[in-house]
Amino acid sequence: MYKTIDPKDISTRELHGYLLGAVAPRPIAFASTIDSRGNVNLSPFSFFNVFGSNPPTLIFSPARRVRDNTTKHTLENVQEVGEVVINVVNYAMVEQISLASTEYPKGVNEFIKAGFTQVPSLKVKPPRVGESPVAFECKVKQIIATGEEGGAGNLIICEVVMVHIKEDILDEGGKIDQHKIDLVGRLGGLWYVRASGDALFEVPNPSGTQNIGFDGLPAFLLETNRLTANELAKLARHEALPPAEQVKAFAQSEEYRKQLAGKPDEETIYDLAKQHLRNNEVEKAWLYLLQLNNQ
């Protein structure tokens, strides 16, 4: 059963909560801007992402406040000075960025209020955040208002003109190590998520243009309740079923005899296959599962 909602039938505040709870986790743009008088502002936005690499393009959206339809200082600043630094947020600074989200009066410097270090930028006027693991100096190319009522977005389309990356988050190959950068993202309500530790996992891309696909899975696998949809997808991503000769040879192997103690047991075979799938040893999982097809 689904709860089906026409956005026109509920309040903007209610809809806002559903959107933020469902479209998550969202990366955080910690945006530093400056007005025409030189006042610096620093504020986080989770309506944010990357939208291209040539030219390198980031977009974030300071939405109009739902309660009173007012606009945010960040939007006003980029309308006056079309530049911004988008600083990414990691776990070590998450409490500070929450503090910086306070609606201070215009002219208050959130760098000072939230205890961040102002670092001069090289190509734009707003400073960058010294504590951020990566900072993107950007020129604002376009601002698109999606509406004029409370809750409407203002898409700030930015071109990256300079990138600053802390060397201690790089791996030996010079790439960003996802464990070391320790990013956080926004969920619904007051919730955040930390992208590190056990929360991180890799999903291999399908190899080439050929794979088994769900439509190529044996019927007994589609009909069983012993495998999850994710496990079936791993099997379906494989290029082809192991040939019959390989399956037969595996049944005579020392490994198979040792694991099954001389007699095929359906529950044990599924458990072993699931273990190999967890380790991304898909070929070995197939060899076990296809023994069931031969019984």
Image (cartoon, helix red, strand yellow):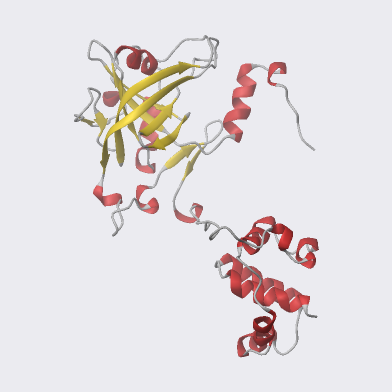
Could one spot residue 62 in this view of the protein? no
Q: Nearer the viewer, residue 62 or 14?
A: 62
Residue 246 placed where, x, y %?
64, 82
Residue 90: x and y in percent read 37, 41
- Residue for point 55% across, 30% down: 189
* Quadrant of the rendered image containing residue 139: top left
On the image, which quarter does residue 91 sit in? top left
Residue found 60% across the figure and 67% down from its top:
277
Residue at image coords 60%, 75%: 284
Q: Is residue 174 above or below residue 77?
A: below
- Looking at the image, which is closer to me, 145 or 216? 216
Residue 147 in view here: yes
Q: Quadrant of residue 265?
A: bottom right
- Tell me if residue 226 comes above or below residue 14 in the rendering: below
Q: Could you say where residue 14 lies in the image, as x and y percent from the top left? A: 64, 22
Determine whether, in the image, residue 276 is placed left or right of residue 109: right
Q: Is residue 202 left or right of residue 178?
A: right
Q: Residue furthest front?
A: 209
Residue 128 left/right relative to 183? left
Could you say where residue 4 lies in the image, as x and y percent from the top left? 75, 29
How many labels sit on residues?
0
State which quarter of the image contains the C terminus: bottom right
Say which residue appears at 31% left-offset and 56% top-offset: 171
Quarter of the image for the N terminus: give it.
Answer: top right
The residue lying toward the viewer, choosing from 188 and 256, is 256
